[in-house]
Amino acid sequence: MLLHMLLIFSFGAVDCAKILFFTYIPSVSHQYVFQSIWKELSLRGHEVTAIATDPLHDTSLTNLREIDVSVGYKTFEKFDYSNLSSEAVGIFGTTDGFIESFMYALNLEMQTEEFQDLLKKPEDYFDLLIVETHNPTAFGIQNKFTAPMIGISSMAGANILYEFLGSPVHPILYPEVTVEQDVTDFNLSLSTKFYRLFIGLGLWLKYNFHYFQQAEIDAQKYFGKGKHHIVDTIRNLDLLLVNTNPIFSNRRPNAPNIIEYYNVHEGRRNSMNDDLQKILDDAKEGAIYFSLGTNVRFDHVQGNIKQAILEALGELPYRARVQELRSIFLDQPMSGIDRIIWWCEYVIRHKGAKHLRSPSADIPLYEYFMLDVFAVIFTALFVMYKIVIFAVRRLVGPLGGRKNKEASEKKTN
């Protein structure tokens, strides 16, 4: 029994690994999620280098080196996220705006001296790369460092990422994350279905014929020419980690190499403004605390959107329903942070996770939808139909001719 346990622990243990955690979006809400992860990785003995717009600056974390790229926040001097909603600029305009702003931020961040020094390290310096997913250019870091790579998102991923990793993609049931949707109602009108299909196909074309092509150019500029095109680099991700929970999402089926995580910062409790704290404490019937985060200014939000927010808040469910959902949300076999750390160490232990890759990720669409099989079936049926028609005509033809001849002779007599 003792030998058995020793074997389990020896194979399950992970030595100290060198991990690069590459984030670039200047947003506290995004960084807040990632901070908990790179902090916990360092506490578990790994040597973590975190590229961050919001460093922790915690001197007690001796295994953590943070590269401060807060210069990325200058992005807000050029871009106003308050009116990048689909109502204001359309879905395609929203996606264009975000991708452009993320690229602008990354350009500022990569010019910092510390970032440039990092790129001078040898290609085998890191054991694992963890890269934020929202700008495809960032995956070009694997042009420089050859370690296994995990994509990580602080929300759901773009549909193109699910497709690349072999998960089912359905633009109507599982629309793009930028498309407004009610995850409790799948009884959709025909117009909604056409709208989601239009958006899904439009963004698929934009990613494949614009975003990825520009990302390849930018990746070569910043990281040098890689062995693969940026599209193939993304396709070869070992894992994709998405911050979603089936209770509050559209419950899409995921391939084994797409891992959902949530509630990773459960233990963090920051104090709030005294006036706000008093309002919440004095609310005898409870209160709804609603925040637009740090990137959106409410005074910049258009009037119709403000009204929609107020109407939505007025229709929120009662306290009992909220408590029920909270209970379901928290009923998990392990904490969110333990789950995500386990999967990161899994990739380190096995030097990748290509064995989890779905075969559907590597076959062309005509094979995925069995068009070749149907083509053979329909061809066989068509050939059989032609043979039967030919045989019938050959058999019926002489008989019909003989009967016609006999009838003609009777008439003559």
Image (cartoon, rainbow, N blue to C red):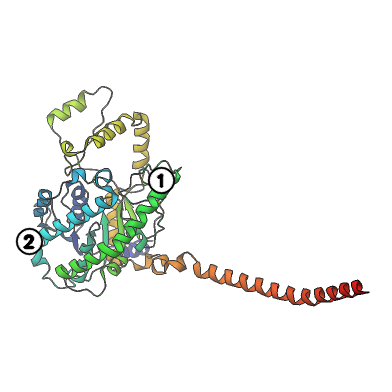
- Quadrant that contains the N terminus: bottom left
Q: Nearer the viewer, residue 329 or 85?
A: 85
Residue in view at x 56 percent, y 72 percent: 376
Q: Nearer the viewer, residue 310 or 363?
A: 310
Toward which corner of the image does residue 331 lie, by quadrant? Answer: top left
Say whether residue 146 is left or right of residue 119: right
**Residue 29 location, x and y as percent?**
20, 46
Q: Which mark is residue 99?
A: none
Residue projecting furthest to the front: 412
Which of label 2 and label 1 is nearer to you?
1
Which quadrant holds residue 412? Answer: bottom right
Q: Position of residue 9 (x, y in %)?
A: 31, 62
Residue 8 lies in what quarter of the image? bottom left
Residue 355, x across and y down, in percent: 37, 68
Q: Quadrant of the C terminus?
A: bottom right
Give the residue at mark 2.
112
Q: Residues within 10 Å of mark 2 (few under 14, many from 20)?
A: some
**What's the residue type where badge 1 is placed?**
Thr
**Residue 167 seen in render:** yes
Horizontal side of 245 relative to 394 (left or right) equals: left
Q: Is residue 76 above or below residue 145?
A: above
Name the residue carrying label 1.
192
Which residue is most to the right? 413
Seen in the picture, residue 278 relative to 149 is either above or below; the reply is: above
Three-letter amino acid code of the residue under disc 2: Thr
Residue 112 in the image, given as x and y percentages of width and height: 7, 61
